[in-house]
Amino acid sequence: GHEEGDNAIVRSSSALIRCFPVGSICVRTGGDEFLIAAAFKNERELKAAIKDVYRNLDEYNAVSEKPYKVGCSCGYALIPAKGGYDLDEITKIADKNMYDEKLRRKAVRKE
């Protein structure tokens, strides 16, 4: 129901806020989708933050006693500080990476 859906959204957003650097911008763009603007030194740092999000949600699921698991698939787009991309291009890159991540995580669950 709505209450449990709200709980999943709150838990997901809390994980994003905890795991991304202070000063990041995190907004819910609709439904269960979020957009985050954050600065990282390199892709390794970004992937570590994403891994922390997954770990944070796994820790919540381990103690929540809910009949469902809260999870997510994170996509990203690395953009040089000098810019040169528009929001549509960035979103397409992030969506492709998110879809690839969903497929990867689904394959791991089947093993």
Image (cartoon, rainbow, N blue to C red):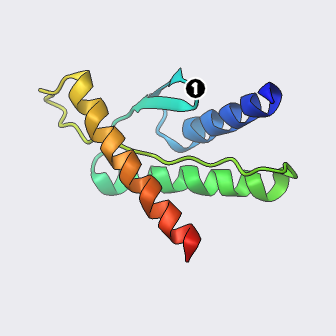
> Quadrant of residue 96 in the image?
top left
| Image side of residue 83 versus residue 18, left or right | left
> Quadrant of residue 7 in the image?
top right
**In the picture, which quadrant includes the N terminus?**
top right
* Residue highlighted by disc 1: 31
| Residue 66 appears in view | yes
Residue sitting at x 55%, y 77%: 111
From the viewer's perspective, is residue 84 above or below residue 104?
A: above
Say how many tags the image has.
1
| Residue 40 appears in view | no
**Could you say which is closer to the camera, residue 54 or residue 70?**
70
From the viewer's perspective, is residue 77 above or below residue 28?
A: below
From the viewer's perspective, is residue 46 above or below residue 110?
A: above
| Image side of residue 11 versus residue 107, left or right | right
Residue 9 percent across, percent down from the top left = 66, 32
Q: Give the crowd class for mark 1: few <14, some 14-19, many >=20 residues within 10 Å.
A: few
Residue 92 percent across, percent down from the top left = 27, 35
Q: Please, which residue is most extreme toward the bottom here?
A: 111
> Quadrant of residue 79 in the image?
top left
Residue 107 percent across, percent down from the top left = 48, 68
Residue sitting at x 43%, y 63%: 104
**Could you say which is closer to the camera, residue 72 or residue 11?**
72
Residue sitting at x 17%, y 37%: 80
Local SS, label 1: loop
Residue sitting at x 45%, y 46%: 74
Q: Amino acid at mark 1?
A: Gly
| Image side of residue 2 versus residue 13, left or right | right
| Image side of residue 82 versus residue 27, left or right | left
